[in-house]
Image (cartoon, coloured by chain):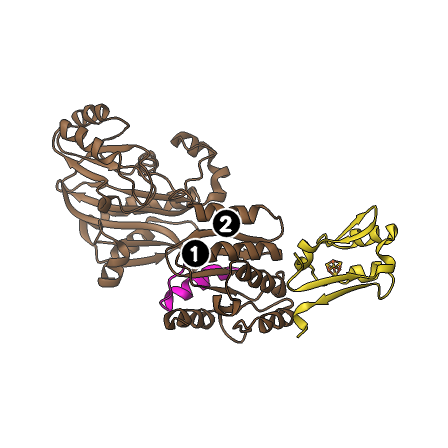
Amino acid sequence: MPGLFIDVQVNADVKGDAEIARKLEESCSVDIFKATDAGVEVVEANLDECVLCDLCLAAAPEGSVRVVKLYEQD
Amino acid sequence: MRFYEYESKALFEKRGLPLGPRHLVTSADEARAKAAEIGGSVVLKSQVLSGGRMKAGAVKFADTPDEAAAHFEAILPIEVRGEKPHSILVESKSPIAQEYYVAVTWDGRNKKPVVIFSDMGGIDIEEVAETHPEHVSKTNFSSLLPITPRLAKEAIGAATVSGSDLNKLTPIVFELMKIFLEYDLTLAEINPLARLEDGSFAVLDGHIDMEAEARGSHKALLKELGIGDDETRQARPPTPFEIEGAKVNAVDHRGVAGNVVEFDGDLGLVIGAGGGSLTLFDAVRKHGGKPANYCEIGGNPSQSKAKNLTKLILSKPGVDKIAVMMNVVSNTRVDIVARGVIAGCIEAGRDPSEAIAIFRIPGAWEEEGFKILEKYGVDYCDRSVSMYDAAGRAVAKMQAGS
Ligand code: SF4
């Protein structure tokens, strides 16, 4: 089930990168990223646990990961 | 941690307080035999941790051993506030001339122990304090400085007791003060403390609560009284609602949310922070509200923990709304709790704007929290509204049925 409050989007061009996937998994304290053989997977069940720390943004190339606050959208 | 009456009396006796003959029994035959041994009229009292034994019919007087056996059979199946008796105490029925009340407890407001004394014992002391305040004295004393019998005398004298009664009561009350301090008690109560027809005094009923954290310091006493390390001594077993709440809390190590105590009101409470739970609970009651539960949240619970607690409270029959209120928080994220309670409402099939009577959690990340609350139309307030007033707003909504 997607998050009610938070969405996390990863650009297609980095999604399959094993190294970025590992870094994202490591950076997130609430397990929103899972590194798999196919790259990174966003764990929907944990999206609303996001603490908005932005560590994932720093772990991936600029602009390739976005944390969206759904409650700020109309 | 609460003691049974027979354990409280064992401690009082160990400390030289006056008590009549008594025996703990677990069968009708034993009740008959011990009543015969004591001789004369006896009283049989169910050993439960909750109050209200008399009203429940779990205290009976018997004039003969056979009557004592019959009363044993009658009392044994009686549950007092859902609690089955541990055993039954048979003791001699004392010819009472006058009943007194004495308790030593902790006075949170003055941050000192207090002796409460009344010459109107045997009945509910809160009722006496309301209807006959001149018959109740409250005397604070220091838990650090040495105490003397003079303090006990002052407490008794302040309730207009004088003469021989004052002199005879003083050592009893003084010993109770010492027991309170020595064993880290939160309550040491004798009610009634009776003057018998022959002029002597006797402890007829007693009640002790020990600070749970002090158990380790008093292992020898607890062993002597037969209180096992694993005995939690809750006044009643947890309800299924409380067990579910504990599960919500245990499943996730992040923060606290889920330790609930069930009440029979209609306003669910998601409350906490630095003593905030007690303050808020009292505030709801003061405004005439009827809490469905007590709980403590804090320490930055995860969104899922706040969500599952909300779902649990809203699942309780008769709960129409919840009030989400905390003291000012620095280590709990307002936005995460807001997400949790809103998601809990939605998953419970409820509209958050209807189900949440008030959201008052000021503190860390409150601006983000307020954005979420606004998005879902939830009524919220910041720290400029006191906890008391926020509770009043929630109760007013319940009363208006809106
Ligand atoms: S902002 Fe922090 S919590 Fe949220 S997804 Fe990124 S790393 Fe995880």
Task: From this view, report whether residue B316 is shown above or below residue B72.
Answer: below
Q: Where residue B241 sits: x, y (%)?
A: 45, 49
On whether disc 2 and disc 1 are found on a single subunit, the reply is yes
The quadrant the C terminus of chain B occupies is: bottom left
Answer with the quarter of the image where residue A7 lies: bottom right
Q: Which residue corresponds to the image point at 64% horizontal and 72% vertical from the top-left?
A: B367
Residue B279: say if magenta. Answer: yes
Along the line of sight, which residue is nearer the eye, A57 or B278?
A: A57
Residue B180: say if magenta. Answer: no
Q: Is mark 2 within 8 Å of ligand 1?
A: no
Note whether residue B267 is visible. Answer: yes
Q: Is residue B254 left or right of residue B386?
A: right
Q: Which residues are magenta?
A: B274-293
Q: Which residue corresponds to the image point at 22% horizontal and 45% vertical from the top-left?
A: B54
Chain the render paints yellow: A
Report the image quarter containing ligand 1: bottom right
Tint of chain B: brown
Disc 1 target residue: B293
Instruction: Determine the CA span between mark 2 and mark 1.
Output: 11 Å
